[in-house]
Image (cartoon, helix red, strand yellow):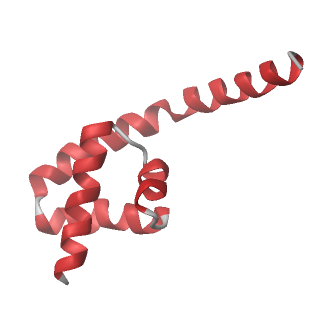
Amino acid sequence: MKDYIEERVLELARYILDTNSTVRATAKKFRVSKSTVHKDITERLQEINPGLAAEVKAVLDTNKAERHIRGGLATKEKYHSKSSK
């Protein structure tokens, strides 16, 4: 694996751990695709640092479990702001 890819993978992992960020938010922050973030975190990070991969997986699993709540809140806010105009 090339050095710059390894650096990116570790940087993505640290960012997700520090901010509890989602894959989508991380991709936007680093200006890469969601697919790249997902592949870096699920496959490449496992090869580089399995312990760190397990920590990041826990954050992503939590985000996945909560996403239906965030979606509901976003919809509620959308319609609340429309009705107040």
Question: Which residue is drawn at the image coordinates 15% and 68% (left, top)?
Answer: 47
In the current view of this chain or complex, which residue is farthest to the bottom? 2
Q: Is residue 78 left or right of residue 41?
A: right
Measured as percent of width and height from the top left, residue 2 is found at: 19, 84
> Is residue 1 visible in the rendered structure shown here?
no
Nearest to the observer: residue 29 or residue 40 = 29
Measured as percent of width and height from the top left, residue 73 is found at: 63, 24
Q: Quadrant of residue 6?
A: bottom left
Question: Which residue is drawn at the image coordinates 43% and 44% (left, top)?
Answer: 22
Q: Quadrant of residue 74?
A: top right
Measured as percent of width and height from the top left, residue 24 is found at: 49, 51
Location of the C terminus by quadrant is top right
Nearest to the observer: residue 53 or residue 76 = 76
> Is residue 61 visible in the rendered structure shown here?
yes
Q: Is residue 23 left or right of residue 16?
A: right
In the current view of this chain or complex, which residue is farthest to the front? 85
Q: Is residue 67 left or right of residue 50?
A: right
Question: Which residue is drawn at the image coordinates 25% and 39% (left, top)?
Answer: 18
